[in-house]
Amino acid sequence: MKNRFTEFHPVRRDRLVQEDRHDAYKAKHKLPEPTVCPQCAAVFHDGRWQWLTKPAGAHEEMCPACHRIQDEFPAGYVTVSGAFFKDHREELLHLARNEEERAKAEHPLKRIMNIEDQDDGVEITTTDIHLARGIGEALHHAYQGELKYHYNEQENLLRVVWER
């Protein structure tokens, strides 16, 4: 009798479907090129979303960032709080907006969705986990303080907490 655990079975790569995380906002199909987002006018070209002039006759489909904004479903949360925040609110929010502008210039899908006041600070929501991390790092670099990250891989969600 053969031992089924020691038998060699070749691995068929075309049959392995092991998705580490599910991102509902990632395109389910290959987008035709060029595709333009009807809301923000970003253009999908050469396999990525870019800020380009809208090509004539382009296919229209909402980009993942506009889709997240419409659904009010952020990928990143940045909580900013502490006594320093109370005294420097506008300065810190200006830094966050500058970080968004820098990132968004090259990557149209990196955007701040909302800035909402909380009891002892604000919560900034973003369309991208990397922008949330970038805002946290910019605050920490400029003003030190305490910076914490919590990444939920299953939901592709990042929570950043900066306090001083």
Image (cartoon, rainbow, N blue to C red):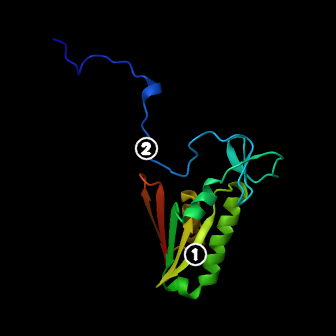
Q: Mark 2 is on which residue type?
A: Asp
- Residue at (50, 50) in percent of width and height: 23
Q: Is residue 52 left or right of residue 112?
A: right
Can residue 127 be seen at all in this image of the molecule? no
Q: Is residue 114 left or right of residue 8?
A: right
Where's residue 120, x and y in %? Answer: 47, 84
The residue carrying pointer 2 sits among few (fewer than 14), some (14 to 19) or many (20 or more) residues within 10 Å by Cα, namely few
Q: Is residue 52 left or right of residue 109?
A: right
Vertically, is 138 above or below 61?
below
- Residue at (68, 56) in percent of width and height: 108
Q: Mark 1 is on which residue type?
A: Ile
Dot 1 lies on which element? strand
Where's residue 89, x and y in %? Answer: 59, 83
- The residues tagged by marks 1 and 2 sit, at their Cα atoms, a distance apart of 30 Å
The residue carrying pointer 1 sits among few (fewer than 14), some (14 to 19) or many (20 or more) residues within 10 Å by Cα, namely some
Between 94 and 12, the one lying in front of the other is 12
Vertically, is 28 above or below 41?
above
Q: Quadrant of residue 136?
A: bottom right
Dot 2 lies on which element? loop
Can residue 118 be seen at all in this image of the molecule? yes
- Residue at (66, 42) in percent of width and height: 31
User: Who comes first in sequence, dot 1 or dot 2?
Assistant: 2
Q: Is residue 87 left or right of residue 52?
A: left
Q: Quadrant of residue 68?
A: bottom right
- Residue at (70, 65) in percent of width and height: 101
Name the residue tied to disc 1.
Answer: 115
Name the residue tied to disc 2.
Answer: 20
Vertically, is 74 above or below 91?
above
